[in-house]
Amino acid sequence: MADLHVAIIGCGGIALSHMEQFYKQQNNVKVVACMDPNVNSAASFSQAHQIDHAYSSFDELMAKETNLDAIDICTPPQYHTFYAHKAISAAKHVITEKPFSLDYEEAKKVVDEAAAMQVKLMVMQNYRWRPEYVKARAMIKAKQIGSPTLITITSRHDLFAFGADEYRKKMERMSLFEISIHYIDLFRFLTGSDAKIVFALTGRKSDSPYVGDTFSVVTLKLEDGCICNLVTSAETIGARINWGAETVIQGTNGTIWLNRDSDYEFKSYSRVLGGASTSTVLTPVKGWFGEPLRCFYESIEGNTEPPSSGKDNLKSLEIILSAYESATHGKSIIL
């Protein structure tokens, strides 16, 4: 891979994960600048990670860093498309954290701009690279459990005890954008099918420190007929914070059970494989960001469409926004 020069936008916890899990292991992808509106955050981040230049202004960064190839956006969600638009307008490749945007039209505009400028645009849907879901998808594609008929995912966290970022507490729409988006995208990844019907309910505790929704139930009917049900909560008192979920994938010829909530267990029962029940304990992923970042930069090098591209992610974003519409009006949304 040829040398690529990168700037990180937003110098918080996600940027730290990107540095530790990917950039510090690379010889050909170098972070040469970082930017955060908080000048102290930018300065301390650059010092901690030996980054040459720190900025508090994106425009100044772009004016002075003339050899940049890509921008890695690690800001709170409301700024994702703002910085993506600026970067793409300057002909830079972009990877942005999820959610892609809080607004579909803004996201669509950025996708169209990336196509016009012939630059790569990828959304960090890193759960697609978790080993249990990679293995489950391979089994589904190989028809080892037949065709999926019902997928249920339950994800519980206690973010307040964890010490959630302040921006999450202020989001008017929180749980679907911050937690559920991972699993909505996984439904699509696992099945290769998009939703045609969306129904959702959202809520929050009366004394919650969050402004927006903190728990939700989303039900999808996919184009292939599979029904998907997702339960997420950010305020499950006493829950572990490991960003995991319990998943059951039922098929016409078998079932897959995934349990990241306790012991990272993978179990399956397949008639196709002779009716044998198997159980495999998967090694927990130490870093969830390294593989998607590697794939993004390989797409630049090979001039290929990145996985979880901006164009593809519009489908996941549309489902989330439809879920909020459903919860607001108390009716199913037909896509």
Image: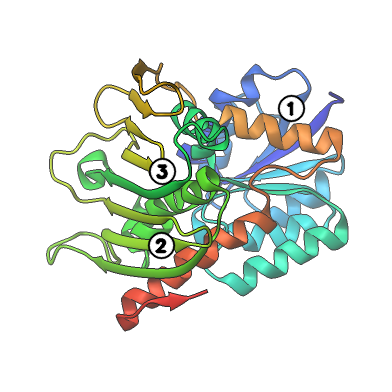
Q: CA distance from mark 3 to mark 1?
A: 48 Å
Q: Is residue 17 above or below residue 198?
A: above
Q: Mark 3 or mark 1, which has the lower sequence index?
A: 1
Residue type beneath disc 3:
Thr
78 and 113: which one is in front?
113
Q: Secondary structure at mark 1?
A: strand
Query: Which residue is pictured at 69% across the width and 54% down the height?
Result: 58
Residue 168 x, y percent position in the rendering: 36, 56
Q: CA distance from mark 1 to mark 2?
A: 41 Å
Residue at the image point whose x is 52% and y is 74% from the top: 335
Which residue is the site of mark 2? 220
Tell me, yes or no, if residue 164 can be seen here: no
State how far apart marks 2 and 3 are (Cα): 18 Å
Kind of residue at badge 2: Leu
- Give the percent coordinates (x, y) of residue 3: 84, 26
Foreground: disc 2 or disc 3: 3
* 311 left or right of 261 in image: right
As helix, strand or loop, the secondary structure at mark 2 comes to strand
Q: Which mark is residue 205?
A: none
The residue singled out by tag 3 in the image is: 252
The residue that label 1 is drawn on is 30
Residue 2 coordinates in the image, percent (x, y):
87, 25
State the image quarter where residue 295 is shown: top right
